[in-house]
Amino acid sequence: MDDAVTIRAERRFWRKVKVSETGGWLWTASTDKDGYGVFSIGRQSLRAHRFAFGLRHGDPAAAVQLHHLCEQPGCVNPDHMVLLSAKAHKHAHTDQITHCVRGHAYTQENTYLRQNGMRGCRACARQRLRELRDTPEGKERARIYRQSERGKEAQRRYRQTEHGKRAHRESEARRRESLREG
Ligand SMILES: [Zn+2]
Ligand SMILES: [Zn+2]
Ligand SMILES: [Zn+2]
């Protein structure tokens, strides 16, 4: 495909995507029987989520499959997908799932209910947050959140917890240390 065709295709692609409140990039055009979005370029018919993943990371090899951590096959957000072998992918979709795709057990403490009614893994959610925090966008979002009323309230509540008290003491100690050095 030459560049002009790709750019046109991409533009057409994003017009079919709607961002949900929970961060899903939902495909609004046609889907196949498994719920995956279908996107065509010329006579070629592609799975929309693979196309989106390819835009970000390059096309995945034909043998690997993309699994939706968000459990929404119609979602084309590359951050919600992981590459799995066919076998691992099948396992991820069996009824008796006791672990998330990254191997964390779905214990009571490690499980939360997503807004879409699916199970979520807390360990993975924390990891995603940590990864997001390191991006410029994440830092900016965190800054805005800290200054909001909700963010301030969350910080107040956090400081009441044992973990929060310790973190506060440690950061105070570091601050004094750096004053002494400077
Ligand atoms: Zn998603
Ligand atoms: Zn899957
Ligand atoms: Zn997990």
Image (cartoon, grey):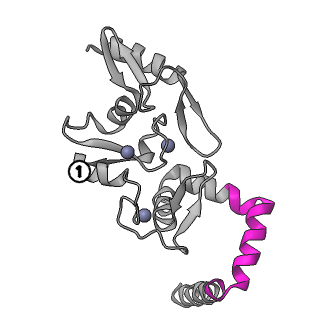
* Residue 175, image quadrant: bottom right
In the image as oriented, which residue stretches furthest toward the top? 42
Residue 45 in sight: yes
Q: Which residue is mark 1?
A: 87
In the image as oriented, which residue stretches furthest toward the front? 95
* Side of 62 relative to 7 (left or right): left
Up the image or down, 169 lies above or below 95; here it is below
Residue 85 in sight: no
**Along the viewing direction, whichever of 30 and 80 lies nearer the viewer:** 30
* Side of 41 relative to 79 (left or right): left
Residue 150 pos. (x, y %):
77, 62
Residue at 35%, 62% (x, y): give it. Answer: 102
**Along the viewing direction, whichever of 65 and 7 lies nearer the viewer:** 65
* Side of 44 relative to 98 (left or right): left
Magenta part mainly helix, strand or loop?
A: helix
**Along the viewing direction, whichever of 115 and 174 lies nearer the viewer:** 115
Look at the image and give the residue range highlighted in magenta: 144-164
Residue 124 pos. (x, y %):
45, 63
* Residue 43, image quadrant: top left
Residue at 47%, 58% (x, y): give it. Answer: 128
**Along the viewing direction, whichever of 80 and 67 lies nearer the viewer:** 67
Residue 61 pos. (x, y %):
20, 37
Residue at 54%, 67% (x, y): give it. Answer: 111
How many marks do you count on the picture?
1
Q: Amino acid at mark 1?
A: Lys
Residue 66 lies within the magenta run: no
- Please state, as top left, top right, bottom left or bottom right, where the N terminus lies in the image: top left
